[in-house]
Amino acid sequence: MEKIGYILLSIVALFWLIGMVIGLIAIFPFGIIGLLGITGIGWLFVKVLRERLKSKEDDYYSKTVKK
């Protein structure tokens, strides 16, 4: 059930992002600022995700520390 929820939320977020990009392209001269902002946030998100997946220390603590 949880995975289905995450999948549905991902699909909605993807469509929302596509709609936002299309809207920013429609208002071309001013939309470039928004596109640059979205691109910057996307690069940072990928960087954080990549660091999290490579971190063995975080995996160790999430598996061994009592909650």
Image (spheres, helix red, strand yellow):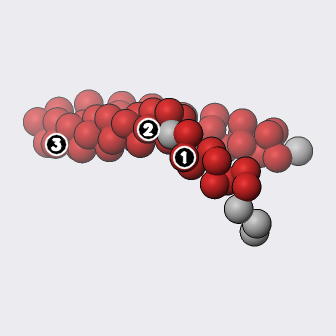
Element type at marker 2?
A: helix
Amino acid type assigned to the residue bearing label 1 in the image: Glu
Rendered residue at 16%/42% (across/down)? 33
Residue at mark 1 to residue at mark 2: CA–CA distance? 11 Å
- Closer mark to the observer between disc 1 and disc 2: 1
Instruction: Give the x, y percent position of residue 44.
Output: 33, 41
Percent across and percent down for residue 9 are 66, 44
Identify residue for label 2. 51
**Which-is-in-front pick, marks 3 and 2?**
2
- What residue is shown with label 1? 57
Residue 49 seen from this side: no
Q: Residue 20's x, y, as percent?
A: 39, 40
Badge 2: how crowded within 10 Å, few (<14), some, or many (20+)? few
Please name whichever residue, 32 or 40, is drawn nearer the observer in this view of the structure. 40
Question: Foreground: 21 or 58?
Answer: 58
In the picture, which quadrant includes the C terminus?
A: bottom right
Which residue sits at x=41%, y=34%?
46
The residue sitting at 63% across, 54% down in the picture is 61
Q: Earlier in the sequence, mark 3 or mark 2?
A: 3
The first of marks 1 and 2 along the sequence is 2
**SS at mark 3 in the image:** helix
Inspect this view and state whether residue 29 appears. Answer: yes
Q: Nearer the viewer, residue 49 or 9?
A: 49
Q: Which mark is residue 32?
A: none
Which residue type carries mark 3?
Ile
Graded by Cα atoms within 10 Å as few (under 14), some (14 to 19) or many (20 or more), the crowding at tag 3 reads few
**Callout 2 amino acid:** Glu
The numbered mark, 3 or 1, whose residue comes first in the sequence reads 3
Instruction: Tell me how far mark 3 sits from mark 1, CA to CA.
Output: 37 Å
**Where does label 3 land, which residue?**
33
> Label 2 near label 1: C-beta < 8 Å?
no
Query: What secondary structure is marked by label 1?
Result: helix
